[in-house]
Amino acid sequence: MTPTPSNRLDSPSFKLALALSLRRFANVHRPPPSSSPSEAQRWKRKAKDRKREILRLREELKQLEDERACEADSPIASCRCYFFDGIGESGGNGGERGGGHWMDEVLRRRFLRLVRWKERMKKVDRPLDRNHFLSFDNQNELEQLGTSINFVLELTENILVKGEVGASFATFSHQAVDFILASMKNLLASQKETELIEDIVNGLIMRLIRRMCTIPESDGNLSINSASDPQFCVQHLIRRLGNEPFIGQRILLSVSQKTSVVVESILFMDPFDESFPSFHGSMFLMIELMEFLISDYLRSWICTEDFDIRLLDEWVRSVLHAQKTSELLESRIGLYTLYMERITGELAKILSPLARQGKLDLDILSSILC
């Protein structure tokens, strides 16, 4: 007997299939659980936070681009820069103008803006604290000194890598050196953090001397003793820093010690070594720098009230040691001995009054005159 449609509807299997279908339909169209609204709100908050972050970064990028355009369009300085006048010339204008010219307030603020912009470009991948940069002028002098020193080191590194001196190098290095000298004057007057200042200055001197003795990577046909030669530019920059006795005496101590080390290296070096000529070039630059510093500044140094006689004694002995060491090279080349005799002759002329006043050890003076 064939089941009728009504019998099929009443069959248990049909009822079971209908119940399963209804169950599936209910599962598919079930409303979301109570936790879903909070999950959606959390994602909405994340999207809003991301949008705010993107807008903030766009604003900072626009600010950086505007400042960069401002730096590029505005004039570098308001006066003709004489910083490299007399480069490589003994007695130049280092002693005459070095202590009489300081940055005015306009150039000082401009230099600080330039340094801040450089620092921001290094940290562009990190969030910028606008309040930090707005309050930069109010930070202590020691931090500004360290930042300007880093700026000078970056300037010198760039010209050595490129092997050429750009048009803006003279002005930027001039402003940086004047800023360092002014900061040093203020810090030394406060008579605080002297040991820390000495460590900072010694680090600056050591790195600048190393750069002065480094042959540029792109060593072209550059003229000697000119503002187009990166090594002589670094030498001149060090010479200008020597206007401050605190820095100048430490330069003389470091460069005389370095000279003795280089002489000893040359004595044991193969003359056919590829680096042999560069060692001689370094010798010339360092000995010439000593002569410049002594002829430019020593007379004015010893007239200052807070002149460090103890340090004078130390670097004079070091210069004499460098002279004795250079005599060992006489069998190879007597030029260095001649240069060192010129330096010690100038020393004897300037320091004789100090010896008569009892401020300088007579043994040192007799060693100089020998």
Image (cartoon, helix red, strand yellow):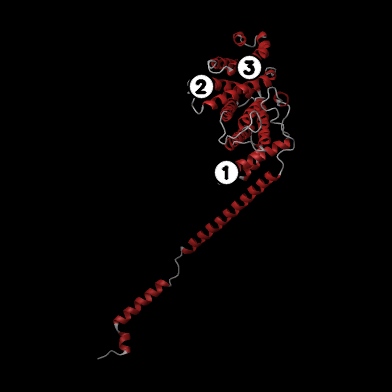
Callout 2: SS: helix
Write down the quadrant of residue 189 in the picture.
top right
* Identity, as a three-letter code, of the amino acid under mark 1: Lys
Do residues under tags 1 and 2 come within 8 Å of each other at their CB atoms?
no
Callout 1: SS: loop
Residue 343 placed where, x, y %?
63, 17
Q: Is residue 345 left or right of residue 329?
A: right
In this rendering, the answer to whether 31 lies above or below 206 is below
Residue at which label 1 appears: 123
Whether residue 231 is visible, yes or no, is: yes
Residue at which label 2 appears: 266
Residue found at the very far bottom of the displayed protein: 1
Residue at which label 3 appears: 343
* Mark 3 burial class by Cα count in 10 Å: few <14, some 14-19, many 20+: many
Residue 340 placed where, x, y %?
60, 17
Task: Name the quarter where the C terminus is drawn.
Answer: top right
* Identity, as a three-letter code, of the amino acid under mark 2: Ile
Residue 158: mark in rendering:
none
Q: CA distance from mark 1 to mark 3?
A: 46 Å
The answer to which of 334 and 282 lies nearer the viewer is: 334
Which of disc 2 and disc 3 is earlier in sequence?
2
